Amino acid sequence: MGELDPIALAGTAVHEAFHVFQRANARPDRRFGRGENSALVSRYPVFDARDEAAFALEARLLSEALRATRRTDRVRLAQEFVAAREARHRRLPEEIAQFDRMAELNEGLAEYALLRTSELLARRDGGRVSRRTLTLADSLRTITGDVSRSVRLRFYSTGPAMAVLLDRMVGPSWKRRLVEDDLTLQEAVAEAAGLRERERSLIADATRRHPAPDLLAEAERNIAALRARRRAQMDSVLAAPGVLLVVDASRMAQRDHGNCGFDPQNTLPVTQRIKIHMRWFRPCNTSNTSGEFNTKVVHDESLGTLAAVLGDESAVEVTIGGGAVRLADGERREGQRDIRIVAPSASYQAGKGTLVRRGRELRLELEPD
């Protein structure tokens, strides 16, 4: 076993520590720290010659931008790189384009941390270069040539290359903006290279004619009216005459009903977590707990409930273990098995649950089998 390179070892440690930092700072509404979908590696278009040629072009443009010594040349080449990258991404399925961007944010930034650490330590030691530190500009020129390597490893070069390019164009300020404005590295390069200035100018002209505060106020009024309308629709659905079935899945592992079928053209959001299925819905919590509604259903994901009016009492049949039952007002039957509720417009079966009757409401509280 050869002698360990302390600079390479330190850089690798920082690379892995940076991943810990990313995960610790990940947020659901931000891309930083989320990572890429590695399962897409097997679906990457490596047998598409046109895409491979386009990838090689953008990598070489990025290499030239890193080598440029004059700012004007660096900015022009950065713009060419982003234009080539965006043109290639427009031809790809969005999930593949997103894989590029997220892999660069994930592994690319971690590799950038490795390279910066190696540079700092090498300068401290009198300029000795770590064996692990690669010349980014050189690696980019041959990035598609090594067919023995995973396509995912390409982003270990493109990611840090963009980060180094950003350092050279705008200094360290890009790092805060990347996180706060939820940018990808290529978006940050586009901003730094002035590629969005024309776009900002056009938007500024448009908003002078149509002031943003006025549009925002109008949007808020429209949303308030929509919320009121949808609430009224929900109240109307639940107030229809007949037995009101409420299926409560809050005690189940997933705290909701699952979804094996619905009509997207006839589904109305009341809030982000409440929907009205106006025509058809098939919940499927488990293999033993499922139903089908050919009527209007209010699905409250926050509470884990479904609510639907089944019609007249005489048309609703409830069985427990195969035997018909009729619950009196206020009656509660806990821990029942093989529960079935059948009506002309809906049916539901549960492996285990509690049945409760309160006035017109028949409540089924689902329990794990």
Image (tube, rainbow, N blue to C red):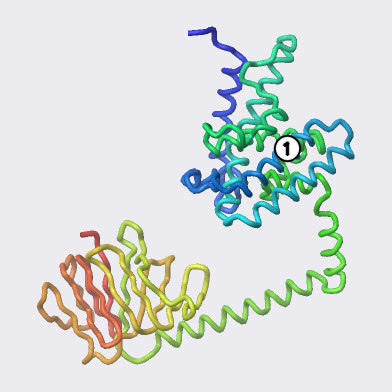
Q: Quadrant of residue 317?
A: bottom left
Residue lying farthest to the front in this orientation: 49
Q: Amino acid at mark 1?
A: Arg
State the residue at coordinates (30%, 80%).
245
- Foreground pick, 308 / 172: 172
Q: Quadrant of residue 369?
A: bottom left
The reply, left or right, for residue 84 in relation to residue 351 is: right
Looking at the picture, tell me which residue is in the foreground, 194 or 16. 194
Picture coordinates of residue 200, whole percent (x, y): 83, 59
Residue holding disc 1 = 60
**As displayed, is residue 368 above or below residue 159?**
below
Q: Could you tell whether 215 is left or right of 334 in the image?
A: right
Corner quadrant of residue 366 = bottom left
Q: Position of residue 275 (x, y in %)?
A: 46, 74
Residue 5: give x, y in percent of width and height: 58, 12
Q: How many marks?
A: 1
Left-right relation of 202 to 331: right
Q: Position of residue 250 (x, y in %)?
A: 34, 63
Q: Residue at x 82, y 74 (%)?
A: 210
Q: Secondary structure at mark 1?
A: helix
In this rendering, the answer to whether 193 lies above or below 274 is above
How crowded pointer 1 is (Cα within 10 Å; few <14, some 14-19, many 20+) is rated as many
* Residue 149 located left or right of residue 362: right
Give the residue at x 81% y 41%: 77
Q: Is residue 293 above or below residue 354?
A: below
